[in-house]
Amino acid sequence: MHLTPYLKTWPHPEKPERIILLATRRCAALELSTGLWQRLVSGGELSDRELATFTRLGVLVPSREAEQESLRNTFATLDVASRRFEVTATLTLECNLACPYCFEDPFRGKLVMTDATADLLVARLVERMASGLDVLVDFYGGEALVRLELLRRIAGQLQEAAVRNGVTFTFNLFSNGVLLTRPTVETLLPLGLQAVRTTLDGPPDIHNRQRPFVSGRGSFDTILANLAAVHDIVPLKIGGNYSRDTYRRFPELLDHLLIAGVNPAKLRDVSFAAIMPKADGTGLGDHGMTCACTAEPWATEAHLFLRGEIIRRGFPTDRLGPGACMIEFEKDWVVNYNGDIYKCPVFMGDESLRIGTLADGTTDYRQSHNLDLWKNDECLACAYLPLCFGGCRFFSKLKTGGFDAVDCRRPMLDASLEQLVLQDLRLRP
């Protein structure tokens, strides 16, 4: 057995005779003695229990070369194994908020999925059901709940089709929370609603400046009241967008949630991200969502600070795990309101990145999206590869104008990974 090439170690900051180890492919974090580590490095004798544990956690592998080849085939293996087809469906690009940093701003407007396009969407997903695949839809916008009746019609038809085909249909909802009332959620749960992703951009004064109604009135109180009213019946994923000037005040938002009666144990996830650029590359910030990040010192500090505050207050948040751009997954589509198909929501509106339509099907996008970009010697030898797989294609495009270079995460992970692991070891139960 050999040490995996996908391994990071650090001296324990408080215990001189111990080290912290992370097997990045399994995201298994361990604390062990320097003596045991030396036995691992030198190929010394291990007990049966030690050998079994290190093998199970991916620290030891039969062959480093085979491990690397297995990583090259990660997505082909996952696509074959997956029995679920996932679609992000954009019902409308209308929105009842006027966020100045909205990344959809370059192409947003009163653009709505027609009944004919909705019928095509249902037909294409029923075809997947007929082949034995479960279907998961993320209803997206704009603000998806502006078109609630359309959402209900699509979800109802897919729920009926799933029963006929002996598979499952579920859906998530991306919503700004303004229309997320308890009666609305109660009507959606029987149709397959399993979680809602919503956004609060800090305490009221910051949020109301960043996420006002179209009229200019603040939206914080409306959204917070709705979240408090529904969090016990549907899992919520609460996000927020910060800047260099606002991130230190985001813990105040966590306290507002607690005061409003939101039970952290009922939530699915709380995580904040820096404001990301708009779809055309303009905007206030450096990164956002879950797939984009930066090595700027302030951004690393902000992420670690906020993650720690979330954990300390008992809210659930992201655990360290493998990450990859969604374009890598064959059974993932993003469908625009007009039936155009893309591989990521931030690609919508860019004709050059469209991979097909609901009417005509999809084309081979391996070359246009440079899917094998990360399969180079430098990336394959990098211990961080299982955490990024070449990073975010959107940010790669912003940097170079195309997909001809990876969005390397090494500087960011060099600056933050050790502290992320220590946070989990110190703060998590």
Image (tube, rainbow, N blue to C red):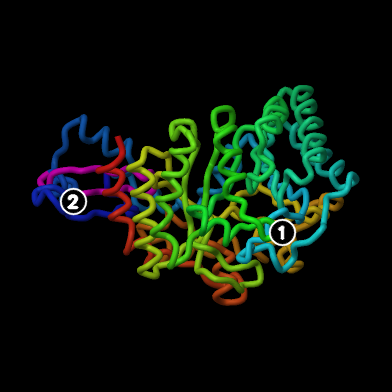
Mark 1 or 2, closer to the camera: 1
The front one of 220 and 351 is 220
> Is residue 172 one of those drawn in magenta?
no
Q: What SS does tag 1 mark? A: loop
| Residue at image mark 1 | 215
Picture mark count: 2
Stretch of the chain drawn in magenta = 19-35
Residue 20 spot, x, y in % from top left? 22, 49
Q: Which image quadrant for residue 197? A: top right
Residue 254 spot, x, y in % from top left? 43, 45
Q: Which image quadrant for residue 378? A: bottom left
Q: Is residue 211 above or below residue 168?
A: below
Q: Is residue 236 above or below residue 333?
A: above
* Amino acid found under the numbered disc labelled 2: Val
Asked whether residue 122 appears in the rendered view, the answer is: yes
What's the residue at 69%, 35% (across, down)? 135
Give the CA separation, mark 1 to mark 2. Answer: 63 Å
Residue 162 spot, x, y in % from top left? 75, 27
What's the residue at 36%, 45% (across, down)? 27
**Is disc 1 in contact with disc 2, using a CB cutoff of under 8 Å?**
no
Q: Farthest residue in the right direction?
A: 116
**In the figure, is residue 23 to the left or right of 345?**
left
Dominant SS type (magenta): strand
**In the figure, is residue 292 to the left or right of 52?**
right
**In the figure, is residue 36 to the left or right of 54?**
left
The front one of 84 and 378 is 84
| Residue at image mark 2 | 41
For the N terminus, give its image quadrant.
top left
What's the residue at 37%, 63% (across, down)? 300
> Is residue 27 one of those drawn in magenta?
yes
Residue 87 spot, x, y in % from top left? 69, 45
What's the residue at 35%, 48% (across, down)? 309
